[in-house]
Image: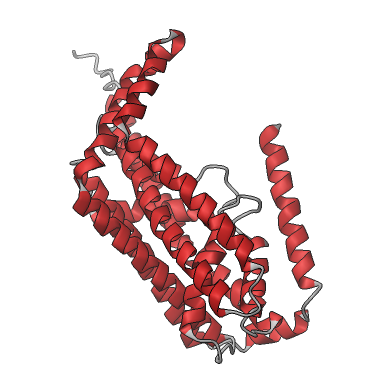
Amino acid sequence: MKTRLVNLLKILVTLALLAFILTRVDLQLVAGIIARADLPLLLLATAMYFFAIFLSAVKWQILVKAQAIDASLGDLLAFTLMALFFGNVLPSNVGGDVIRAYDLARVTKGRAEAAAISVVVDRLMGLFAFFAAAMVTAALATMMLTQAQALEQIETATVIAASAFVALCAMLFSRRFAARIAGLFEIGPAKRFQPIALNVYRALQVYRFRYRALALNVLLSMAIVVITAGVWFVVGRAVGITDTSFFAFLLFNPLIAFVLLIPISFNGLGPKEAAVVFFFGLVGVPNANALAMSLLFHVIVVVTSLPGGFVWFMKRRHATAHEYEASEMLQPAPVSSDSSQ
């Protein structure tokens, strides 16, 4: 019941925000801009986004290796693509990180906690890079854009969120905090989860002194922020936004992503369009062009997620074939009806 209510609220928020934006732009103008969009530039933007996905798998592999988990880059890329498919295409309540952790855990043979922690730390380092970029860009936008007084509230929100995030990371890696939490697993029913908690703690502590792995992960996360800003830039050029510099896209990309951290809609539809129209309106981009850019960017996100569905289907088909072969091998041998025996 609660899940249905949350989904209903997300649908209502998505529809309300889209309706709010669509009533403030000429839909025929937006459709015309999309129809005239430069296809080669859109293909280039799609290739760039695929490259960002590849880098995501590479930076995850760095953390997986730190846990001494034997998983190839190909496997991690497949898990990443499947997670994107379920997260961006299907209205699922299961997050992409859960899917990544589950798929990696299946191939680790008893290292499920370490697999899950690699996903958690990968997400934390990505958020660290994102918050750092959002704080810097919010401050720069507030100082450089005379029309950006409203960004002061967003800058305050990013500082608060970043501070809370740093505090959370400190607690996760703190041995003192872990020692206090450990006492909870000595009480009643929680005692049965003590071995799992201990494995999680050990997996987290692996990264305490893996400075090189963490630094490389953060650097790649920063590179992904720049590449996705480049994707926005190329899509913007494809829909006729030619007077806006790349620096503006670099400024607004983390801020748009910051807005999307609030899970109030399905796959970011609605809040993303509202954020894009607002931010790029600050630098004189017409609402129709900004909305067309946002919608085409969303199409690229969905298109680059589709290979994950194919990978998932092929893996499921392969697993089903193995299960069928195994069941055939377990069938008893036929009894001979030869009367001479």
> What residue sits 62% from the left and 71% below the top?
276
**Residue projecting furthest to the right:** 23
Does the image show residue 70? Answer: no
Give the tally of numbered discs: 0
Q: Quadrant of residue 73?
A: bottom left
> What residue sits 67% from the left and 72% below the top?
278
Location of the N terminus (image quadrant): top right
> What residue sits 63% from the left and 54% below the top?
266
Q: Report x, y in % for residue 263.
A: 61, 50
Does the image show residue 238? Answer: yes
Q: Report x, y in % for residue 179.
A: 33, 23
**Is residue 58 rendered to the left or right of residue 90?**
left
- Front one among 118 and 243: 243
**Is residue 69 rendered to the left or right of residue 59?**
left
Q: Where 295 falls versus 265 (above or below)?
A: below
- Front one among 313 and 250: 250
Q: Where 242 falls versus 301 (above or below)?
A: below
Q: How is the image coloured?
A: secondary structure
Q: Where 228 falls versus 193 (above or below)?
A: below
Location of the C terminus (image quadrant): top left
Q: Report x, y in % for residue 213.
A: 22, 52
**Residue projecting furthest to the top:** 188
Q: Quadrant of residue 169?
A: top left
**Is residue 162 rendered to the left or right of residue 155?**
left
**Is residue 38 rendered to the left or right of residue 32?**
left
Q: Report x, y in % for residue 77.
A: 32, 56
> What residue sits 31% from the left and 43% below the top?
118
Q: In which quarter of the image is residue 286?
A: bottom right
